[in-house]
């Protein structure tokens, strides 16, 4: 008797990945206090470069505005201020993708929206994710009582699984450039997924959080693919693009042409956001808009290039050692094969014990991640260089 | 065939309240362009005082920190920084209420958490709300496919309905000081609700967004009532307290002793937040912490007193006119009876047409609001004074 809780929460597995990493580091530090300052962390998915000067300037100007009655801003539009939506609309034109301002929703980050979007769908539907996978896609679906299917990624498909027409899914999660593998779909790959989704009357949830690392002709947005506006919602963020992991701003694109069960998903999302959200801080939206100014864009490019240099150092080292990897190009992540057939956690221990370098065991991202290891380009150049020198000496033995 | 949407969204009624108000104002302005600058808005639930100087200072200092690698903050804890949780923990001690830091979750506002909390419960449960009611409680439950029951508020109970033991509910929404009626439960009233909830094994969702207006011995927090920690979740916000409606910060208290279906709701909420949220902007959390400094607290008190003076002006006018109302004391809202038996919208039109004052028709908050009208204390003192002078002349006729 009494209130019934959502029992699906009990089906979510506790993720011990980062807790286990922290524990092993702590044990190592305690037994090697003299080496503690030699530790280099290459496992983090968080940025290290500070906010661009232009962004800090915008934050401070907006803070001053808020301190004066005449320029104070109270409740803003739940879906974001036009000044920011218009900047994003303009940014998409460079891909080139045409969006209506009303199709762009400002949020406090891709993670919130990726979770909350499930509100629009029935419970018990089937979600297709890749393996290895960003754990948030899995956990949010389990919490809803949804079913999960896995598309296996591996060396045979360059960690870019393609749709299997015999599999029926309602939701399809694609992350490109991928976390954790750094692999990037080209137009042909994404076109296959768009066609598959349309055939199954499924919705693609496209996570474009790392699009700012994409170079050349590879797609930044799924809407570069014909037909995607009829089947895909896109999530993006200022986190990696502009160092907003602690500042919190992102955006979600829900095209007007997404109509399922006779209902516009854009209108449903608008309803969801106006009912359960009160918009992103005015100050933070002003900061995000500064990312698109001439100075802001230049500073951001410099930061991204800084991380790309780190990625190049990692790739060069692995190339010299003859180790298989994906990513690094068009991505801040390098997904390497553990040498000598080592399992992910054994390689983790080896790196920690012998060269004091921390990465992320691939097995933590799913079964198909076993035997692989993720290194990130988000550390400093000095530390990345030092870590790669140590790795070269260790593995060239 | 294909993905199934959440059809409950179609059951949510479009709220035409604020759209209808905006439309009537627009029509009036177009037909009376010469009077347009005489319009006084007393319907808004948004604040008008700027952010305190101490808060602006904290925002700017934190922005500078974010611009330097050594003091940059990336991803923070999803449940909020300890420096802010500890301030809130200390604030609760003044009620006096003892909370563990882990029971306090920082959010981007009460509205988000009031919506998202339903994630923890089964769909199809029964929610009891008061009538009149803040529409978010109703709409979020309809979206989940929950059933709704209404506890009727009126002059017979001072707009403070008490529990009916024959009614079975799973969730109970209480807002005190109330939006829209400004009525405040005393200890006896809240104790009755706590006892009712415990008897039914129900959960109280207590919206304390206006607690900063409470004076004297009335409860600020439901946890001042014995037993509440076994049945209540409390939502609060810096919006009204410190003018954060556009800055976005709030907090939710989920006591450790809330155990339903064998599960800790605190642990479930932690799981929800770590999976579907990435924390509030570091800068905004620093600003919220400044609210609790000596200077910050003084400035906030001044702002609240400013609004309280407005409320007093409104109450004095209604007292002189012999009009029934609730609120005004311990609340920024004054809920007045429309004079001469007028219906809410007719009184709205009368005020707009004859004295160019805009309020909110009570009927917009539910059936029991018909014949009532909400005025808010959030305008400037000059405008509030002018509006009350006009109202006195109009109704003293």
Image (cartoon, coloured by chain):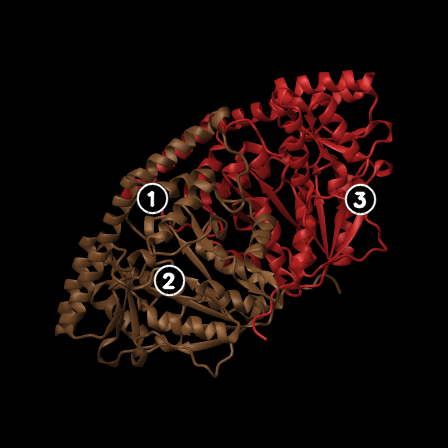
Chain colours: A red, B brown
Do badges 3 and 2 share one subunit? Answer: no
Q: Tell me: residue A392, above or below residue B251.
A: above
Q: Indicate the secondary structure of the residue bearing disc 2.
A: helix
Residue B224: which disc? 2
Q: Quadrant of residue B187?
A: bottom left
- For label 1, the residue is B292
Gap between marks 3 and 2 measured at Cα: 49 Å
Foreground pick, A14 / A78: A14
Q: Indicate the secondary structure of the residue bearing disc 3.
A: helix
Give the chain of mark 3.
A
From the image, state whether disc 1 or disc 3 is nearer to you.
1
- For label 3, the residue is A367
From the image, state whether disc 1 or disc 2 is nearer to you.
2
Q: Quadrant of residue B360?
A: bottom left
- Viewport quadrant of the N terminus of chain A: bottom right
Question: Residue B317: x and y, percent?
Answer: 16, 67
Gap between marks 1 and 3 measured at Cα: 48 Å
Gap between marks 1 and 2 measured at Cα: 21 Å
Question: Residue A298: x and y, percent?
Answer: 53, 24
Residue shown at 38%/70% (left/top)? B190
């Amino acid at each position: 008797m009494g209130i019934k809780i959502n029992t699906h929460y009990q089906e979510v597995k506790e993720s011990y990945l980062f807790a286990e990493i922290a524990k092993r580091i702590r044990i190592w530090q305690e037994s090697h206090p003299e080496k503690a300052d030699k530790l280099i962390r290459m496992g983090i998915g968080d940025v290290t470069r500070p906010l661009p000067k232009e962004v800090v300037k915008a934050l401070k100007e907006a803070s001053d505005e808020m301190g004066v009655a005449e320029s104070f801003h109270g409740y803003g539009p739940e879906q974001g201020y036009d000044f920011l939506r218009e900047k994003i609309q303009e940014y998409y034109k460079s891909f080139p993708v045409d969006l209506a301002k009303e199709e762009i929703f400002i949020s406090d980050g891709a993670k919130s929206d990726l979770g909350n979007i499930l509100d629009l769908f029935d419970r018990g539907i089937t979600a297709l994710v890749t393996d290895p996978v960003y754990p948030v896609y899995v956990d949010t679906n389990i919490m809803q009582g949804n079913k999960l299917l896995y598309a296996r990624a591996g060396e045979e498909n360059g960690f870019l699984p393609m749709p299997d027409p015999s599999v029926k899914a309602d939701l399809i999660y694609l992350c490109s450039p991928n976390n954790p593998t750094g692999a990037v779909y080209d137009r042909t790959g994404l076109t296959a997924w768009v066609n598959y989704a349309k055939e199954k009357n499924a919705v693609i949830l496209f996570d474009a959080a790392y699009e700012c690392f994409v170079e050349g002709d590879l797609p930044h947005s799924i809407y570069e693919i014909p037909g995607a506006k009829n089947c895909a919602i896109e999530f993006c963020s200022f986190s990696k693009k502009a160092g907003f992991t602690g500042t919190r701003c992102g955006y979600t694109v829900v095209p007007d042409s997404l109509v399922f069960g006779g209902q516009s998903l854009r209108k449903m999302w608008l309803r969801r956001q106006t009912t359960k959200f009160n918009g992103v801080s005015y100050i933070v939206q002003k900061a995000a808009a500064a990312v698109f100014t001439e100075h802001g864009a230049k500073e951001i490019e410099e930061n991204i290039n800084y991380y790309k240099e780190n990625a190049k150092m990692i790739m060069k080292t692995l190339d010299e050692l003859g180790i298989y990897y994906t990513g690094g190009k068009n991505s801040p992540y390098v997904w390497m094969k553990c040498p000598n057939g080592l399992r992910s956690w054994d390689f983790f221990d080896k790196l920690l014990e012998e060269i004091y370098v921390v990465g992320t065991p691939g097995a933590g991202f799913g079964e198909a991640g076993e035997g692989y290891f993720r290194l990130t380009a988000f550390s400093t150049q000095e530390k990345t260089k030092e870590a790669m020198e140590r790795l070269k000496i260790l593995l060239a033995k």
